[in-house]
Every structure is written in C-alpha cells, then in structure tokens.
Image (tube, helix red, strand yellow):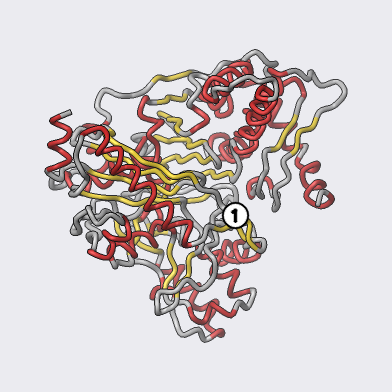
C-alpha cells in the first residue's frame, strides 16, 4: 500500500475515463499498468423528440461523479488525496453529432450513435465517396441536417464527438484521436488524417448552399496515439474536480472512441488480430492487412488508435433485452421473498443456456431496442417468437437470447470471413457478455467458427484501455510503436484463456442464423404495425 501511495502522491499514476452507453467509469493505474482505483456513474440515454440523446447536464454530472468516486476510492484505500496525475485520457462512445457555434454553444441536442435517422444522407455519401458511410457517423448526421434544411447548419463552427467535446472543454484544444476521427469521416491511412479527396467531394456537393464554413474548418485536428494533445487547464481541473484538489497542467493524450480503447485493452492493434466488445451494443474490430475488395454497408472501415485500417462490424443491440429478461426472473424470485444475488442469477441462467439444443430448439428472438442497420431495421421492436413445434424450455429460452445478442454481428462477420477471406490469428472478447466464464466466450466462438480468448483484464474494458493510451504517450521510448508498447510492456506473457469452437455449436449457430435472417420480415412487420 505504501508503494502505491507513493506512486499516487508523486503524480506517477495515470487515469483513463470512458463514457459508455450506460456507465461512465474512471480507472487509475500504476506504472505496471495495474488498476489501483476506480469510480463510476450509471447513466442512461433518453429518447427526446425522436432523438436518442444525453443532455450536457447528464454529461458533466456523470463526469464529475465518476471522478469524485475515483478520488474517494484513492483516499479510502491509500489514505491520501488525489492531487497530481501523470497523464489522463478521455474516451467515449464513437460517432454521433455534437455541433457548436462560434461562441461554443451546442446548437442541437447531442445526437448519439444510436440514432438511425440519417439513412438518405448515409446512402448518398456512400455513393459519392465509394466508401461505406454508416448512419452513425458524424458526417452522416451533418449531411442529413443539410438535406433536412435544418436552421442550425449555417451557424456550425465546430463538430466533434463526445470524447472530443470533453477534451476540448478540459484542455481548450479542438483535437481528436485518429481512431475516434475515423467514426466521423473517412481517414486516409497514409496521411493518418481525414481523406482530403473526399473532403473536396463533400465541399463540391454542398457548394450551392453557400454556408459560411468549410468542412475542413469545422472538423477537429486529427492526432495519433502517443501524440501530445494538450494539458488540463485551471478551468478544466475545476470542471473535472469540483473539490479543487486536483492540480492543473496534467498532460492529456488524444481523445479516443470506445472501439480504439477496446483494441488497446485487448492488445488488438496488430494486423490479423481482432476483438469483440459485447455489452449494450456489440462490435468486432479486425485489423486488416489490405483494403476490402468491395464496399459493404455492413462493414465500417475505421482505424486503430495509431492509424491502421480496421474492418468494424457494429450492431446497435446486444445485451439490453437479455438483461431485461434476467431482470424479469429477478422480479419473479423477489415476489417469492427470495433475495437475489444478480451475479449468481446471471451465472445460473447463462450456464443453463449450455444445456439447450444446439440450434436453440427452434426459438427465435430479436433484442432490438433500437434500429439495426445490418439487418435493415430502422426502429426497435424487441420480439420473442416460437412455433407450436419449438422446444420451449428455460435452457433454449436463455440460449436463444444469447445467440440473438450476436445475431446481427454474425451476419456482418460472415462477410469478412467468408466473402473477403480475412485472416485472423487471434480474437479477444471483452465486455459484459463475457463475465460468466466460458458462456459468452463459447457462443462467440461458435458464431465466428474461430477460437476466442478472454483475458483476466478484459473486465477492465475501455477505461483501462484509455489509461494505457495515456500511459503510452507519457512513457513511450523514442520510436516505440503502440503495438510494441502493448505487447512487451503491458501484455507480456498474458495471452488469456482460449476456447475453441464446439463443432455442434457451430452447426447449431448456422441453423439459428438462417432462421434469424429469414425472420427479419417478422421484425419489419412489428416495426410497421406494433405502435
């Protein structure tokens, strides 16, 4: 304890803080990259006038509360106050749209990645660039606002992501990490900057509107992992720590998206490696050796935090509906006067799924709380469906909800693995789906028919990954790559526990996914008729 206290007091500890979909978490690490304190804040997005959003008050309340709890954890464990920090990094959910005027005022409520209201813009830009532009991307939101004739567009002076916004407010610098930037607008992997040719095409596309801005002017400056991205100002220190204890001047690394922090947290920045993050949403990130042969609407092309090309399969829905069903079982038990341990409940129900039929006994479900781009569904309609012949029991019921959590992901991954023949040496899983040992891991292995590893550190997730990126900026040696830093100084000797796919589960998942794809018509009917 005394050595950790000395690391903290001397300002050598490093902090990463990430805004997830349902939780904001801060993690403090020591010089061995081991977490030594943490603090978190639960929050939830809201549907406001048809837009999924978080308010500025939500954002700042959550940031301050998570930091306050981190500082309290430090004091409780080590008997000292958190005054100095060696480096900080901020990360958040990628994509979305935060637009500000020249006075720095937010012009419209924050439009998050979860919105599926930019279809016409995304389709038009994909054709214009010959490059897949998903609905979630910032440029889709901006261009859809142009198409809609929205009044605020003429006043735009700066657009950024949630992580970019936090970084700007705490440092005064309008910058963004290349990984997060790649969810705003396409990146040229040679220059590691926004693609200049595509920017020119966009400018020509909107020239007749005569807006008083150019796209290049309103986008943040792109930085790579390891670059210095400013420092915590006096004002920023007070925004973060209301107690006034934290000293200003802390170096801050480029802000990143949750995809990039997931890659860092799983040592998946090298070509032919990949990771799957499964929580409220689910995405797979595969670091590619070369460009894809075709443009696929199901595959986003983004980058690692140091600018390598990544094929990303992103599904908006994963465990939310599954969690709701587990909550129903808790409510059932509590009505019998049984006190429920949620970890035990999740573990029991997840393991029960392993007893089910390989193909889930003919059951079908869709955990779509929001639209799902990969399968062409624009609005959320969670459904559970069965035929009279389906084998309806608890094991199959839990199994189908675990399978469907990865259903849309599999549709996209099949393109990379079966059509593009992308080579993968290692896949690492992290996120809530993998907390029950061997269950989510085995189901993902079945879905992609490849071995899946989970590290003990996987539960640390994005905030820890962000802390690693901050540590890399602070401690890297001259010429040392992010890949080498992670492999040799963070993950040396830790490859995780690997699980090979069970052949029967692989066959069962293939049967299930055909039922899943065929049943999308049911989901579309519900979207139309279930109001």
Q: Quadrant of the N terminus?
A: top left
> Which residue does the numbered mark 1 point to in the structure image?
46
Which element is circle 1 on?
Answer: strand
Residue 425, by quadrant, is top left
Rendered position, 489 above or below 309: above
Residue 455, by quadrant, is top left
In the figure, is residue 340 to the left or right of 247?
Answer: right
Rendered position, 95 above or below 438: below
Q: x, y (%) of residue 135? A: 58, 58
Rendered position, 213 above or below 168: below
Q: How many circles with numbers are drawn on the protein?
A: 1
The one nearer the camera, 418 or 528, is: 528
Q: Residue at x 43, y 69 (%)?
A: 197
The one nearer the camera, 344 or 455, is: 344
Q: x, y (%) of residue 101? A: 44, 77
Residue 397, by quadrant, is top right
Q: x, y (%) of residue 343? A: 52, 23
Q: Residues within 10 Å of mark 1 (few under 14, many from 20)?
A: few
Q: Residue furthest right?
A: 388
Q: Residue furthest front?
A: 337
Q: Residue at x 75, y 38 (%)?
A: 383
Q: Residue at x 20, y 59 (%)?
A: 248
Q: x, y (%) of residue 402? A: 62, 28
Q: Residue furthest top?
A: 355
């Amino acid at each position: 304890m005394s050595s950790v206290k000395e690391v903290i007091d001397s300002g050598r500890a490093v902090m990463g803080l990430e805004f997830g979909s349902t939780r904001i978490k801060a993690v403090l690490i020591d010089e061995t990259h081991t977490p030594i304190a943490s603090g978190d804040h639960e929050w939830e997005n809201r549907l406001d006038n048809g837009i999924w959003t978080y308010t500025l008050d939500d954002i700042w309340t959550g940031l301050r509360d998570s930091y306050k709890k981190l500082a309290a954890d430090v004091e409780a464990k080590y008997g000292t106050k958190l005054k100095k920090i060696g480096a900080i990094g901020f990360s958040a959910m990628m994509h979305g749209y935060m637009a500000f005027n020249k006075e720095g005022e937010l012009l419209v409520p924050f439009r998050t990645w979860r919105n599926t209201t930019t279809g016409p813009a995304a389709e038009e830009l994909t054709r214009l660039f010959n490059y897949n532009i998903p609905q979630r991307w910032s440029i889709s939101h901006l261009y859809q606002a142009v198409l809609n004739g929205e009044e605020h567009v003429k006043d735009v002076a700066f657009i950024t992501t949630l992580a970019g916004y936090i970084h700007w407010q705490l440092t005064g610098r309008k910058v963004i990490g290349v990984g997060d930037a790649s969810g705003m607008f396409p990146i040229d992997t040679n220059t590691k900057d926004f693609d200049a040719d595509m920017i020119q095409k966009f400018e020509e596309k909107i020239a007749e509107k005569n807006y008083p801005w150019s796209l290049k002017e309103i986008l943040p400056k792109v930085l790579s992992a390891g670059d210095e991205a400013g420092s915590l100002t006096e004002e920023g220190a007070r925004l973060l720590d209301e107690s006034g204890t934290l000293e200003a001047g802390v170096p801050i690394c480029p802000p990143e998206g949750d995809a990039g922090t997931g890659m860092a947290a799983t040592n998946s920045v090298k070509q032919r490696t990949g990771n799957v993050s499964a929580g409220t949403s689910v995405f797979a990130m595969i670091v590619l050796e070369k460009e894809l042969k075709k443009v696929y609407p199901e595959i986003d092309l983004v980058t690692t935090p140091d600018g390598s090309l990544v094929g990303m399969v992103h599904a908006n829905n994963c465990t939310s509906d599954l969690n709701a069903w587990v909550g129903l079982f808790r409510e059932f038990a509590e009505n019998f006067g049984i006190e429920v341990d949620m970890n035990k409940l999740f573990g029991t129900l997840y393991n029960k799924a392993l007893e089910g039929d390989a193909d889930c006994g003919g059951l079908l479900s869709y955990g779509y709380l929001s639209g799902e781009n990969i399968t062409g569904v624009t609005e959320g309609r969670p459904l559970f469906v069965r035929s009279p012949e389906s084998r309806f029991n608890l094991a199959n019921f839990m199994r189908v909800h675990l399978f469907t959590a990865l259903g849309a992901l599999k549709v996209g991954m099949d393109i990379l693995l079966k059509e593009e023949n992308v080579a993968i040496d290692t896949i690492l899983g992290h996120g809530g789906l993998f907390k029950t040992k061997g269950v989510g891991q085995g189901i993902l292995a079945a879905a992609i028919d490849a071995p899946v590893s989970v590290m003990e550190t996987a539960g640390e997730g994005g905030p820890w990954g962000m802390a690693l990126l901050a540590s890399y900026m602070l401690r890297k040696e001259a010429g040392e790559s992010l890949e080498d830093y992670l492999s040799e100084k963070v993950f040396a000797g830790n490859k995780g526990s690997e699980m090979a796919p069970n052949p029967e589960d692989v066959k069962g998942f293939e049967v299930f996914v055909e039922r899943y794809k065929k049943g999308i018509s049911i989901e579309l009917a519900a979207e139309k008729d279930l109001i």
